[in-house]
Image (tube, helix red, strand yellow):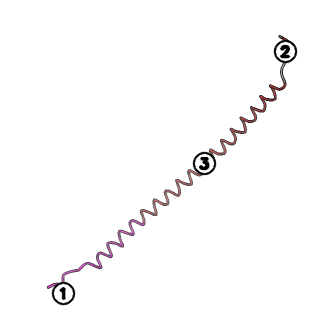
Amino acid sequence: MEGILQKPDPTVGKLQLQVDDLIERVTDKSMKLLAQRHAELQQCEFLGAEILQSSKQFQRLSKRTTRKYKLRRACFPCTCCCF
């Protein structure tokens, strides 16, 4: 029985190498995916900031246009029609 336990099993060694290889491949792929997701997140943040800036510019322009329109339609007292 002792001879069997002391004798190294080549199958176990091969399996250990395969497991180590799989772990390394999974780690590499995970790191690549993580880097890709990080780049995508940065792109989304950049686009979100641009959208927010455009929205603020649109609101300012919209307020100016509304004020101009109200001034045009305002009736100022005059002697010809108001008195």
Element under disc 2: helix
Element under disc 3: helix
Residue 4 lies within the magenta run: no
Element under disc 1: loop
Disc 3: which residue: 37
Rendered location of residue 17, percent (x, y): 78, 31
Judged by its main secondary structure, the magenta piece is helix
Instruction: Assess disc 2: are there few (<14), some (14-19) or many (≥20) residues with their C-alpha within 10 Å of its C-alpha.
Output: few
Q: Answer with mark 1 or mark 2, whichever residue precedes in sequence.
A: 2
Instruction: Assess disc 1: are there few (<14), some (14-19) or many (≥20) residues with their C-alpha within 10 Å of its C-alpha.
Output: few
> Which disc is residue 4 wearing?
2
The image shows residue 64, relative to residue 17, as above or below, that is: below
Label tally = 3
Q: Quadrant of the C terminus?
A: bottom left
Would you identify the image quadrant in which residue 25 lies? top right
Disc 1: which residue: 81
